[in-house]
Image (tube, rainbow, N blue to C red):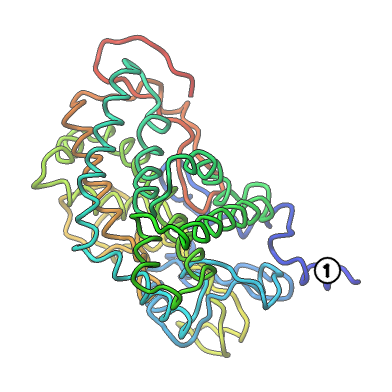
């Protein structure tokens, strides 16, 4: 087999290291996208990056250009299997990797579970989980790692409550979380972790088919019965986990860091009348989901003056688009009081995150609780010692040592 043929058969998941040029949209300088991304967006918001396996890869980094691509329901496919080198009979779970009419059918199953009315039943559980984690922080203090004690446990436990995972399943499932978003060693590890977590949830669905739990999985089984297959439900549950765990954890950790740099905004996050403005601006400013699922052009077309060829891959940079000047003056500044257009932190169009309202509920409850419990919270190490997750589709920080109140001297290694 030729090298080219081998590359096509193994796909991007077989690359030991991704080409450096393709990783540029995932690189940051602290919490900010690297300057090269801004230059590219300002000069050429639809830019051909390079060819991989004979396929053109385009980066869309402008706000309006991103909205145009993401809102287009007919010109692109999100079926990622050809890029991964996965056979046509394989199933890649989650709504993000499906096209209409399959996407429409699956989203119709999931959407009713994410209405405001149904999610309201989770609010007491969210508040309880936040309070328990704040108690744990207070007990572990005076200096704690906010990532370990607060940012990761909250969304993980909320997702477990939402899905209805029994207590004994939660720890092995947690270990599969972070690796699926890390492409620093190429695609193999990330997609391997994705397959393992999907298999775990598939087994959970099979067991709940016999004895439905009281969470989302059991609820769908009770309502739809054999109308939804174990494979479909496992894929949907995996998509819920993918969209709701690492993303919210990174929002809580990086969001806290951003607020600690701006005491006025930190105080605003502790007031019910202003916390929603803070959360919305954090979602825009941080754009922890840095890029969207790839879009594959179904036909030759012109996009903002560029000739796109059938089969070309388009990657939308949410971190780039959310810092576009189209979002108002000084978009690189964090300003909860600014009057800005709708951000793209949850995506846009028919692939927009179905769990957006749940994420806002978590963030609202968590920041309110954190600021009210620890109004004098401060970073416990010099900012330059923080280690960020370079080359992760979901951007984050490895550890965030914080001091619960001024004057304490305990040390936590970053």
Relative image position of residue 37 (x, y in whole percent): 48, 57
Residue 319 screen position, x and y as percent: 41, 57
Q: Is residue 404 above or below residue 206?
A: above
Is residue 84 found left or right of 325 in the rendered image?
right
Between 156 and 278, the one lying in front of the other is: 156
**Residue 341 placement, left or right of 308:** left
Vertical comparison of 138 with 147: above or below: above
Residue 373: where, in percent of width, then height? 19, 27
Residue at 69 percent across and 60 percent down: it is 13
Q: Quadrant of the N terminus?
A: bottom right
What kind of element bears circle 1? helix
- Determine whether, in the image, residue 185 is placed left or right of residue 164: right
Q: Quadrant of residue 380?
A: top left
Q: Residue furthest front?
A: 210
Q: Residue furthest bottom?
A: 300
Q: Position of residue 379 (x, y in %)?
A: 34, 25
Is 398 placed left or right of 370 in the picture? right
Residue beneath disc 1: 6
Count of labels in the image: 1
Return the residue nearer the eye: 137 or 27: 137
What residue appears at the point 47 percent right and 61 percent down from the top-left corner? 210
Disc 1 crowd rating (10 Å Cα; few below 14, some 14-19, many 20+) is: few
Residue that sits furthest to the right in the current view = 1
Q: Residue furthest left?
A: 273
The residue nearer to you, when weighing 96 against 327, is 96
């Amino acid at each position: 087999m030729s090298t080219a043929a081998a590359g096509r058969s193994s796909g991007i998941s077989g690359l030991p290291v991704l080409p450096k040029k393709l990783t540029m949209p995932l690189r940051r300088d602290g919490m900010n996208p690297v300057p090269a991304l801004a230059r590219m967006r300002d000069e050429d918001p639809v830019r051909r990056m390079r060819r991989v396996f004979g396929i053109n890869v385009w980066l869309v980094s402008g706000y309006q250009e991103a909205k145009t691509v993401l809102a287009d329901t007919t010109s692109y496919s999100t079926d990622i299997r050809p890029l991964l080198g996965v056979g046509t009979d394989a199933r890649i779970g989650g709504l993000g990797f499906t096209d209409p009419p399959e996407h429409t059918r699956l989203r119709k199953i999931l959407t009713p579970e994410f209405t405001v009315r149904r999610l309201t039943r989770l609010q007491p559980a969210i508040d309880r989980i936040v309070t328990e984690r704040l108690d744990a922080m207070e007990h572990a203090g005076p200096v704690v790692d906010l990532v370990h004690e607060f940012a990761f446990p909250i969304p993980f436990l909320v997702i477990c409550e939402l899905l209805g995972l029994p207590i004994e399943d939660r720890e092995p499932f947690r270990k599969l979380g972070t690796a699926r978003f890390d492409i620093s060693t190429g695609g193999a590890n990330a997609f391997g972790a994705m397959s393992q977590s999907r298999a775990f949830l598939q087994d959970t669905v099979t067991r709940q088919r016999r004895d439905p739990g009281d969470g989302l999985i059991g609820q769908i089984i009770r309502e739809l019965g054999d109308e939804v297959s174990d494979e479909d439900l496992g894929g949907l549950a995996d998509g819920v986990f993918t969209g709701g765990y690492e993303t919210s954890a990174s929002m809580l950790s990086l969001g806290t860091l951003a607020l600690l740099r701006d005491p006025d905004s930190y105080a605003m996050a502790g007031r019910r009348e202003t916390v929603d403005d803070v959360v919305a601006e954090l979602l825009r400013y941080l754009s922890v989901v840095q890029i969207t699922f790839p879009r594959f052009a179904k036909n030759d077309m012109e996009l903002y003056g560029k000739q796109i060829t059938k089969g070309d891959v388009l990657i939308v940079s949410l971190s780039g688009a959310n810092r576009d000047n189209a979002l108002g003056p000084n978009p690189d500044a964090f300003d909860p009081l600014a009057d800005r257009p709708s951000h793209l932190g949850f995506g846009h169009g028919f692939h927009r995150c179905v769990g957006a309202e749940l994420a806002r509920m978590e963030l609202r409850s968590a920041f309110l609780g954190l600021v009210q419990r620890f109004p004098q919270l401060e970073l416990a190490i010099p900012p330059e010692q923080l280690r960020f997750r370079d080359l992760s589709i979901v951007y984050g920080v490895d550890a965030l040592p914080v001091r619960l109140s001024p004057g304490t001297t305990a040390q936590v290694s970053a």
